[in-house]
Each structure stands twice: as C-alpha cells, then as structure tokens.
C-alpha cells in the first residue's frame, strides 16, 4: 500500500474478470499513490494486460470497483466514462498496431482533441503538436509523415505524444518497449521516465523485464493466474521475496542473470 499520508490516485477493490468459465482476474486489490510508479509483473498469461484493460474499462469487469480519485469508474455511464478518459491514458505494447497507417502524425496526435474538444482550442492544435513532438524528441517535420515512414522507436514516441496530448495524470504503460529493438528500448524508457519526472503523472507499468522494474518502480505487484500473490516496495520484493512464485520469477529472469535471489 502507499505510504501513510500519500493520497491514492487509483484504488482497485476485489476486481474480477471472467471469460466464460475462465477467471482471468480473481479479487484483485491495490492502490497507486500520487506520482508513484507501480510495476505489474508475472509470466505471460498471468493477467497483467487484462488487468490494465479492465482498469480503463476497455474490457468490462465482472465485479469489484476501480476508483479514480474516489469515483468508481465501473459505475459511470458510457458517456461520462468517455469524458473521464481525458485523465487516464494508455500506451500499448505494439506501436505498429496502435497507430492508424493512413493518418499523418499530426492527425494521430491531435485525434484526442477531437474527442475532448474542451482540452484545447482548434487554433492551437498545430502549435501543440509541434510542442509534443519536441517533448518526445522528434523533429517538427515528422508532423506530415505517415507511420510507414517511421521506425518502431519513432512510432512509439508518437504514441507517447498522443497519450500526453490530454495532459493525463494517470498513465498505464503496457510493455511499452517489448516490441522494439533492444538498441531502442533504453532510449524510449529514458524518455518516458524523464517525462514522468517532468510532469509528475502516476504510472502503472506492466513489464516482464525485472531488471528494468527494479530500476524505475516504487512498488511492485506480482501476478500469477489472475491473482496478486505478493506486493510491496520494490527493493523488498527483490531482496526478500515472501512468496515461492516471486522467488521462482526472479530466479528465472534472464535480465537478472547472475544476481543472487534470497
């Protein structure tokens, strides 16, 4: 749980998700404090991405509550939830699939303002697109490009710019660099962490790279078969894991090869 006195931005309570007879999420509960980076780890099929999509109501929950600043998102009418998405954004794993191939970069980045016109007057869209491109380290000239002209890392930077266009204060990063070349991954992660430090948004960071999690996360939750088997401060999870599955996960991680697991 967050430190005493730190206000939770997001509180998840007894969250469940069923796909027919399969329980994908089983009574999940956690909180994320203001400005915190919470990592979600676990092997493929553990429920990490299902959790991310259910929290943002991209998938309908089967039960429980997801409270953003005290309001249960699961109770909101669809139109009100649409307006709420101004504050909650997600960067997806695959930059090749998340950008429409027939839209130029300036159209992709300005798309959120079409959905949420109260955020920015149309006369300022071009100026703001250029500002966002600068913030993610891309030249202004890229505004006229189609995604096909961009590398994987450049596409993910455009996806980041689009997510930041609404000035969200809660961001889910779902394996944001796993689809990129290793040589590019560090650049994108450095960019994301610099932006998080500058703007102070709260993050839920889903990753299988445990060395990276240890480097950037404040706290960690460990998922196994749709359940949270352990959660706590990052260094405690890595140096004194309490659950057998957590120890197994640490021992089998290629990114932690050579490090002793208690």
Image (spheres, rainbow, N blue to C red):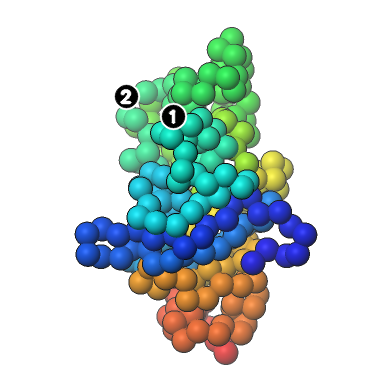
- The outermost residue toward the right is 5
What is the quadrant of residue 138 in the picture?
Answer: top right
Residue 225 placed where, x, y %? 35, 72
- In-front residue for pair 85/105: 85
Can residue 77 be seen in the rendering of this structure? yes
Up the image or down, 141 lies above or below 33; here it is above
Name of the residue lying farthest toward the bottom: 262
- Element on which disc 1 rests: helix
Binning the other alpha carbons within 10 Å of mark 1 as few (below 14), some (14 to 19) or many (20 upward) gives: few
Q: Residue at x 59, y 14 (%)?
A: 121
| Crowd around label 2: few <14 · some 14–19 · many ≥20 (10 Å) | few
Residue situated furthest left in the rendering = 20
Q: Quadrant of the C terminus?
A: bottom right
Give the Cα separation between the discs numbered 2 and 1: 27 Å
Residue 52: x and y in percent read 44, 53
Tag of residue 79: 1
Q: Is residue 223 above or below residue 52?
A: below
Tell me which residue sits at (61%, 72%) in the image: 232
User: In this rendering, would 216 be left or right of 244?
Assistant: right
Earlier-in-chain disc, 2 versus 1: 1
Q: Which part of the image, by quadrant, shows the N terminus?
A: bottom right
> Does residue 205 appear in this view?
no
With respect to residue 235, does 121 lie above or below? above
Kindly identify which residue carries mark 2. Answer: 102
Element class at badge 2: loop
- At horizontal 53% and vertical 19% (from top left) the residue drawn is 117
Counting from the top left corner in percent of width and height, residue 86 is at: 54, 33
């Amino acid at each position: 749980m967050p430190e005493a006195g730190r206000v939770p931005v997001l509180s998840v309570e007894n969250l469940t998700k069923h796909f027919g007879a399969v329980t994908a999420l089983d009574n999940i509960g956690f909180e994320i404090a203001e400005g915190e980076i919470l990592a979600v780890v676990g092997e493929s099929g553990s429920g990490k991405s299902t959790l991310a999509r259910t929290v943002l109501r991209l998938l309908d929950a089967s039960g429980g509550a997801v409270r953003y600043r005290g309001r249960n998102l699961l109770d909101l009418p669809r139109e009100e939830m649409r307006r709420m998405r101004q504050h909650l954004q997600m960067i997806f794993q695959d930059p090749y699939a998340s950008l429409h191939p027939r839209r130029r970069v300036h159209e992709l980045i300005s798309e959120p303002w079409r959905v949420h016109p109260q955020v920015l007057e149309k006369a300022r869209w071009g100026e703001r697109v250029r500002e966002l491109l600068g913030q993610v380290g891309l030249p202004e000239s890229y505004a006229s490009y189609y995604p096909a002209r961009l590398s994987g890392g450049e596409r993910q930077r455009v996806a980041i710019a689009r997510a930041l266009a609404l000035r969200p204060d809660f961001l889910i990063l779902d394996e944001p660099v796993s689809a990129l070349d290793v040589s590019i991954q560090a650049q994108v992660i450095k960019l994301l962490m610099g932006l998080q430090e500058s703007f102070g948004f709260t993050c839920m960071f889903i990753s299988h790279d445990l060395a990276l999690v240890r480097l950037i996360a404040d706290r960690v939750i460990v998922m196994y078969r749709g359940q949270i088997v352990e959660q706590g401060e990052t260094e405690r999870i890595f140096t004194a894991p309490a659950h057998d599955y957590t120890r197994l996960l640490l021992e089998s991680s290629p990114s932690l090869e050579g490090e002793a697991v208690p």
